[in-house]
Image (cartoon, rainbow, N blue to C red):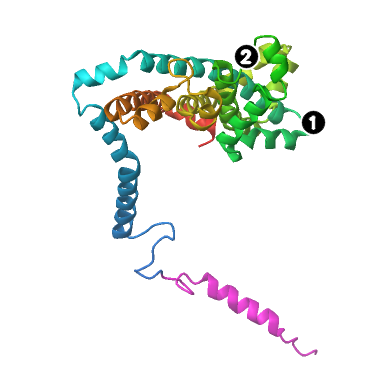
Amino acid sequence: MLPETPIRPALARSAAATATTQRPDARERVLPRSWRSPTTERPLVRWLLIAAALAFLGLVLVLPLVLVFVEALKGGIGVYAAAISDPDALAAIRLTLTVSAITVPANLVFGLCAAWAIAKFQFFGKSFLITLIDLPFSVSPVVAGLVFVLLFGSQGFFGPFLSANGIDIVFAVPGIVLATIFVTFPFVARELIPLMQEQGSGDEEAAISLGASGFKTFWLVTLPNVRWALLYGVLLCNARAMGEFGAVSVVSGHIRGFTDTMPLHVEILYNEYSFSAAFAVASILALLALLTLSIKSVLEWRHGESLKTRRGH
């Protein structure tokens, strides 16, 4: 009779390990009482971080904003009303709103076209186009204003032609509009491009396969999918257009009552030591910014879930 075959050492160890894991309290790991998630902090640390953030925002943002209104009303309501009803101040307010009314629709159309082309199509030079869209973020607004002076000024590249035909661009409203468009055109496009790239082109392809035209696909499919991101971009563009100073300062010529926007008018009044009038006009500019922020907050409150879904937050 053959002797029994001995169990191989490796099989024996495997069987022992299996038996050990089957026991309910074998190799049981007990977390120490001091263990906490790596993404949480102690209450004291959390409160210190929150207090530091609130203190920083209060010192850098809230306090200066409050001081603007305090200084504007320091001389009384009569002085404040006289400052904002001054003909030059009213002209600056009208010009600022006019420039914004031209700039925002122009950037809306450009942003939609650029974002649609970049997100939905593949073409040569796509990366270069994205770089050009980001250019105003890296170029100083003063440099941008000087570029328009070199192009459209009396001694610029197009200067002789414009002078011969009686067309004024630099030191006139068209130059202010061009400079503001240059500074603000990335806002709408940069808000739309990531969202459109994330959504892909499946919805548009489905609509076209069902017989929809290109315009109908854009109006009924693409635009509703990006409407909240588009609105965010418009709000940001409008806020920057009303507050732009550097590029507009170069191309405006500082002609009081004609080419002075609100930020430029505030500078002129401050340099003339008319502090109450300067802060009064600055308070109007701050109120317009707060109005933009309020519209944004109302939209988030009324359509919060849709905003998160559309923007991918």
Q: Which residues are magenta?
A: 1-30
> In which quarter of the view is residue 125 placed?
top right
Q: Can residue 299 be seen here? A: no
Secondary structure category for the residue under label 1: loop
Quickly name the residue at label 2: 219
Secondary structure category for the residue under label 2: helix
Residue at (20% x, 20% y) in the render: 77
Residue at (51% x, 18% y) in the render: 99
Up-down: is 31 above or below 235?
Answer: below
Q: Is residue 138 magenta?
A: no
Residue at (65% x, 81% y) in the render: 12
Amino acid carrying label 1: it is Phe
Q: Is residue 13 magenta?
A: yes
Q: Position of residue 217 (x, y in %)?
A: 67, 15
Amino acid carrying label 2: it is Trp
Q: Quadrant of the N terminus?
A: bottom right
Q: CA distance from mark 2 to mark 1?
A: 23 Å
Quickly name the residue at label 1: 123
